[in-house]
Image (spheres, helix red, strand yellow):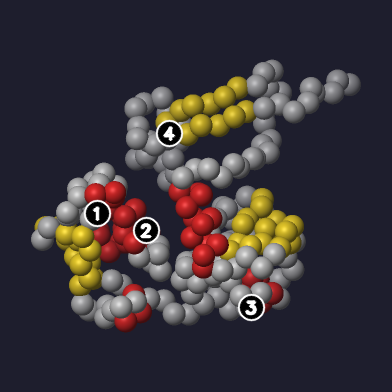
Amino acid sequence: MSISDISPDQPLTLVVPAAASGQRLDAFLAHELPKYSRVQFRKVIGAGGVKVNGQGTKVAYRLSAGDQIAIVLPPMNTAGPHPEEIPLDILYEDEHILAVNKPPGMVVHPARGHWSGTLASALSFHFRQLSSVGGPTRPGIVHRLDRDTSGVMVVAKTDPMHYALAAQFEARTTEKEYFAITAGVPDRDRDLDLTLPPEPDAPRHAVSRKPSRKKSQTGDEIPFAPVGD
């Protein structure tokens, strides 16, 4: 039985295997049911739509082998992005994958307040074959960049390639490089190995030296010496 055959009104039961012991509940659900996003599962859990061993639970609940998860799946959004003739800067393409240079100011996929002008809309116009793993609103989308961030995005044309790329991102074997503008001139290279705990007063994560489960490792390299007057 596929996910599309399951009625949104009927709970789905999953049994946690030993290999998933210790995983967060929301991460496990997103891995097992990839047609839904992790954000969607957080909302469902917060609304009481998920029970573990017959009890309500929290998003960050750590699973144990043999746990029984009952979840009422939310209705699938079957409306994909509207194809739009937006030019794309294609850096690489073959039958499985393509690399796109996303410009700043472009939202990756449709979301509240951003229903048009997205990368997903442009991809839907230019390519007939894109992976369906991310659901109808995210054709081919494996990862994302913030709206105001420019950079290379990898897009999957097939479902097997999508799963392979997603596994690389999850295993953190994908190497990413960023260029940054600094205030002042750094006088040395530096490697940052700090934690990223959630900050209650900030909408996003902030760097901290406090203990945390989530680590952030950043290599900082100055490629050339500043030129004097």
- Marks 1 and 3, how far apart at CA: 37 Å
In the picture, the disc for residue 215 is 4
Q: Amino acid at mark 2?
A: His
Residue drawn at point x = 68 percent, y = 22 percent? 186
Give the answer, above or below, for where 121 lies relative to 205.
below
- Marks 2 and 3, how far apart at CA: 26 Å
Q: Upstream in the sequence, badge 4 or badge 3? A: 3
- Give the SS element for disc 3: loop
Q: Most extreme residue toward the left, as rendered?
A: 54
Which quadrant of the figure contains the N terminus?
A: bottom left
Q: Give the number of the mark in front: 1 or 2.
A: 1
Task: Find residue 123 and report its horizontal and vertical position in percent.
Answer: 64, 70
Q: Most extreme residue toward the right, as rendered?
A: 229
Task: Find residue 73 and report its horizontal and vertical position in percent.
Answer: 28, 71
Give the answer, above or below, for where 117 lies relative to 61.
below
Label 3 neighbourhood size at 10 Å, few (<14), some (14-19), many (20+)?
few
What residue did someone put label 1 on?
A: 17
Q: Amino acid at mark 3?
A: Arg
Label 2 neighbourhood size at 10 Å, few (<14), some (14-19), many (20+)?
few
Residue drawn at point x = 69 percent, y = 18 percent? 187
What residue did someone put label 2 on?
A: 31
Q: Upstream in the sequence, badge 4 or badge 2? A: 2
- Marks 1 and 4, how far apart at CA: 26 Å
What residue did someone put label 3 on?
A: 128
